Image (cartoon, helix red, strand yellow):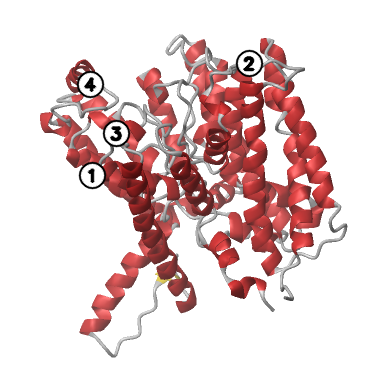
């Protein structure tokens, strides 16, 4: 059978990207040296990454990047970096017998399935975890930093970074960025697509550094001694990619209200189209307030914050009884109820924090929202499908798609009353092509269909292995996996994890995180015969 896809060219480009993964691996290596921790997990991974990358690159010294090769290259790159990303976890747990002893042989990441889950969750910025114990007693600081660094690399996009620095990807780079970047498309900010990629990564890096500095200032001024330099950097690395991995078991609940207030605007910024920051930095700040998607995004966050805040302000906003197997007890419930009910600042803070964390798919938690009542949890479940802006690091369906769908509904209502009218749907004053509209409808329908199928599959498998879960927990788990949100409800909530899932369910969630980060089509198209055949 003659193939229409040049597989050698695609995997050669995967190798070009993969070998440069050795560069960010140097950061946790330096941290390991600083703290006197084993460096073998990172040295071995660097060796594997460079060797594998160079080997793949030699498959085709002069690859020709076309549309079909681009889809395969992007999907394979994300799978490859996740597989390589498991190596530090496995070496920390198993060592390299007989030369290197294991550091933490009791780690849950000793199982390859768990290590792959953690790596894929990191690179796709999902934030779901299978760590049984999130602490420096169970894991080295360097391994925890690698866990957070995977999210920062995956946030803006590994392929977008490659387009910015690799000249061999400058031709066809726009198609690669469209295949990888979250949202219906990516705005070309400069005449050359490589310059656009560098501009996006420059804004991303700058905002990350600013957040780390502000968070660390809390420790320097004595406002929040827990926000050490390590914690400030770690949380900046996982806020801007809307990732949510924290080195603290209690997530952001472990820090002061001041730290939570600082993180909120950065989560909102992470869910904003980064092209808008480029316009602001180049002297056109009015672009931010003129952008219809951004205004809709801020409006949705404001409404969700007001609704959740109102619910938490009243006694009925919390569950009256802790569910069996839940992650909090009656004492915790009494404490948080006393702190929030009738108190304006905590109610608004937790509402704004969780609204931003879930809508932008960051997945942080300022408290265990398992303690919230059904009304507040219902709002959070709705928020899991909203998503950030196109061109942001957020996941889920995306604000711009919902905005266009709502405008489509309004148009249908208008044309029903006025059949003779011709009324195009506009975004930012520009009419949207009907083909683009069909693409938005199709993506949203496929997304919801996959979500329903995933929820059923996960629930059936949980029953098969005797896992005590509710339908709501599996619905939320499916939504957070395909939307790259992270925490769900119950034992899969913000203070829990996904360790109790069976291995088949974990691998299925890995698949959902992968296709969710790439927005379904670049992966599913590979499964069609039409893609491969001439």
Q: Do the residues labelled 2 and 3 touch (CB within 8 Å)?
A: no
Q: Nearer the viewer, mark 2 or mark 3?
A: 2
Q: Name the residue under label 1.
A: 378
**Mark 2 or 4, which is nearer the eye?**
2
Residue 405 placed where, x, y %? 35, 66
SS category of the residue bearing label 3: helix
Q: Is mark 1 on a helix, strand or loop?
A: helix
Label 4 to label 1: alpha-carbon separation: 19 Å
Look at the image and tell me whether residue 84 can be seen. Answer: yes
Q: Do the residues labelled 4 and 1 touch (CB within 8 Å)?
A: no
- Up/down of 435 relative to 46, above or below: below
Report how far apart the C-alphas of labels 2 and 1 lie in the structure: 42 Å
**Which quadrant of the figure contains the N terminus?**
bottom right
Give me the residue at 36% from left, 43% from top. 477
Query: Rounded to the nearest whole Å, what is the CA distance between mark 2 and mark 4?
Result: 37 Å
Question: Can you identify the residue that label 2 sits on?
Answer: 103
Residue 490: assigned label: 3
| Quadrant of the snapshot with the C terminus | bottom right
Check residue 336 in the rendering and tell me which mark sits there, or answer none.
Answer: 4
* Circle 3 residues within 10 Å: few <14, some 14–19, many ≥20: many
Give the vertical position of 181 relative to 248 (above or below).
below
Q: Is residue 54 left or right of residue 352?
A: right
Mark 3 or mark 4, whichever is nearer to me = 3
């Amino acid at each position: 059978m003659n193939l229409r896809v040049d597989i050698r060219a695609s995997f050669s480009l995967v190798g070009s990207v993969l070998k440069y993964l050795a560069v960010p691996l140097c950061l946790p290596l330096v941290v390991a040296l600083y703290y006197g921790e084993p460096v073998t997990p990172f040295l071995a991974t660097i060796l594997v990454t460079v060797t594998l990358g160079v080997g793949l690159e030699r498959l085709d010294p002069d690859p020709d990047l076309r549309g079909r090769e681009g889809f395969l290259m992007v999907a394979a790159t994300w799978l490859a970096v996740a597989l390589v990303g498991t190596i530090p976890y496995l070496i920390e747990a198993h060592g390299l017998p007989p030369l290197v002893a294991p550091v933490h042989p009791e780690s849950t990441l000793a199982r390859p399935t768990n290590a792959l889950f953690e790596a894929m969750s990191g690179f796709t910025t999902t934030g779901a975890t299978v760590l049984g114990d999130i602490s420096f007693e169970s894991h080295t600081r360097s391994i925890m930093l690698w866990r957070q660094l995977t999210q920062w690399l995956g946030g803006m996009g590994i392929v977008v970074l490659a387009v910015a620095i690799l000249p061999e990807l400058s031709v066809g780079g726009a198609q690669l960025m469209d295949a990888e970047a979250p949202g219906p498309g990516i705005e070309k900010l400069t005449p050359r697509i490589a310059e656009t990629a560098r501009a996006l990564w420059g804004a991303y890096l700058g905002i990350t550094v600013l957040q780390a500095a502000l968070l660390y200032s809390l420790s320097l001024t004595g406002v929040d001694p827990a926000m050490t330099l390590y914690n400030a950097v770690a949380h900046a690395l996982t806020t801007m990619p809307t990732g949510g991995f924290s080195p603290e078991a209690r997530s952001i609940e472990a820090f002061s209200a001041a730290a939570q207030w600082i993180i909120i605007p950065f989560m909102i910024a992470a869910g904003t189209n980064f092209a808008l920051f480029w316009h602001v930095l180049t002297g056109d700040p009015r672009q931010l307030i003129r952008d219809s998607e951004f205004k809709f995004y801020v409006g949705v966050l404001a409404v969700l914050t007001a609704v959740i805040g109102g619910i938490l302000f009243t006694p009925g906003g919390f569950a009256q009884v802790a569910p069996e197997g839940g992650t909090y007890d009656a004492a915790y419930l009494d404490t948080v109820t006393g702190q929030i009910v009738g108190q304006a600042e905590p109610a608004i803070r937790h509402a704004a924090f969780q609204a931003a964390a879930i809508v932008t798919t960051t997945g942080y938690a300022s408290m265990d929202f398992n303690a919230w009542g059904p009304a507040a949890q219902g709002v959070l479940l709705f928020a899991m499908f909203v998503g950030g802006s196109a061109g942001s690091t957020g996941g889920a369906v995306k604000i711009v798609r919902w905005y266009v769908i709502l405008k489509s509904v309004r148009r249908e209502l208008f044309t029903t009353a006025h059949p003779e009218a011709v009324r195009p749907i506009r975004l930012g004053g520009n009419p949207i092509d009907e083909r683009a509209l069909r693409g938005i409808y199709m993506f949203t329908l496929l997304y919801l269909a996959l979500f329903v199928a995933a929820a059923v599959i996960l629930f059936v498998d949980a029953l098969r292995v005797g896992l005590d879960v509710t339908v709501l927990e599996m619905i939320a788990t499916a939504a957070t996996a395909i939307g790259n949100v992270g925490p769900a409800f119950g034992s899969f909530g913000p203070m829990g994890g996904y360790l109790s899932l069976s291995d088949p369910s974990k691998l299925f969630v890995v698949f959902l995180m992968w296709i969710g980060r790439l927005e379904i089509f670049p992966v599913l198209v590979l499964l069609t015969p039409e893609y491969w055949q001439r």
